[in-house]
Amino acid sequence: MTYEGVAPEELPLFRGLPVSRRTDLMRHAMVHSVSSGTVLFEQGEVPNFQLIVLAGSAQLFGRSAGGREVLIEAVRAPDLVIPAAVLTGAPYLMQARVPEPSRFLLIHAAAFRAAVEEEPLLAHAAIGSLAAQFRRMVRQIKNLKLRNSTERVGCYLLALSKRQGTPDRAVLPFEKTLIASELGITRESFSRALSSLGKSGIRVDGQTIEILDAARVAAACAPDPLIDGTDGEGFAV
């Protein structure tokens, strides 16, 4: 199987590291390819590895004691998967599941923590990853608390179309139930929001959402770069 993505030596995490440090980390690492549906770890497990996405993605799910499950976010290359748990040695607060064939670099957790303690450049990179993930969570919380369901769905579609490079359409990357849970709504509310947005210039064709009038959709949903954007980039999902 052919994967697109980054090679381990090209990871931003390793940028600027002395060759000796990078080589030492790679001695404690392995590249692991997984198929769609693979569970990387369960919530409550203590990390054995720092996982880094080389190709594909990982979905992070939260689950209640009663078994209710929601999608928190999707992590894509070349991001680290929940470095906060690895660096503190604390249990994962989420489950990680792979929605597509993907490839990961696995660095033994103890070796990663030791390297972060000893190498300022690696510590700086780890802090950068933690900061980026914190800011994504703040944007998500603002999205959930400041918008109604129709506004969330409309801004999601505009952001998705921008990320996919197709301003006149957005292809949903996951099944609608998963996207609804990520947006903090039910599948039924997601469908109602799509129906409501039909009046503002969208048309639904299965997983493809045609955006017939982006300006009207934006007027109805009020996209905000401090919620929908990413640092240094435009909208992103």
Image (tube, rainbow, N blue to C red):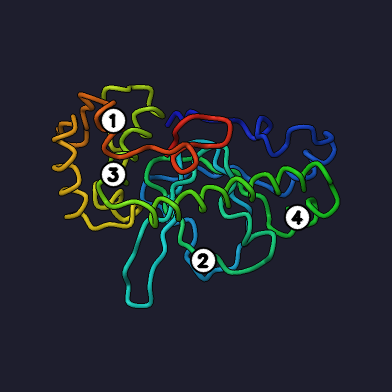
Mark found first going from the N terminus, 4 or 1: 4
Numbered label attached to residue 111: 4
Secondary structure under badge 1?
strand
Q: Residue extending furthest bottom?
A: 65
Numbered label attached to residue 170: 1
Q: Which class describes the residues within 10 Å of circle 2: few (<14), some (14-19), or many (20+)? A: some
Locate the C terminus and report the quarter of the image it occupies: top left
Mark found first going from the N terminus, 3 or 1: 3
Secondary structure under badge 4?
helix
Residue lying at 45% horizontally and 51% vertically, measured from the top left: 140
Numbered label attached to residue 40: none
Mark found first going from the N terminus, 4 or 2: 2
- Image: 84 above or below 11: below
Where does label 2 land, which residue?
A: 93
Image coords of residue 189 (percent x, y): 20, 54
Mark 2 or 1, closer to the camera: 1
| Residue in the foreground of this view, choosing between 37 and 155 | 155
Distance (Cα) linking label 2 and label 1 = 31 Å
Mark found first going from the N terminus, 3 or 4: 4
Residue lying at 38% horizontally and 22% vertically, measured from the top left: 165
Image coords of residue 8 (percent x, y): 64, 35
Mark found first going from the N terminus, 2 or 1: 2
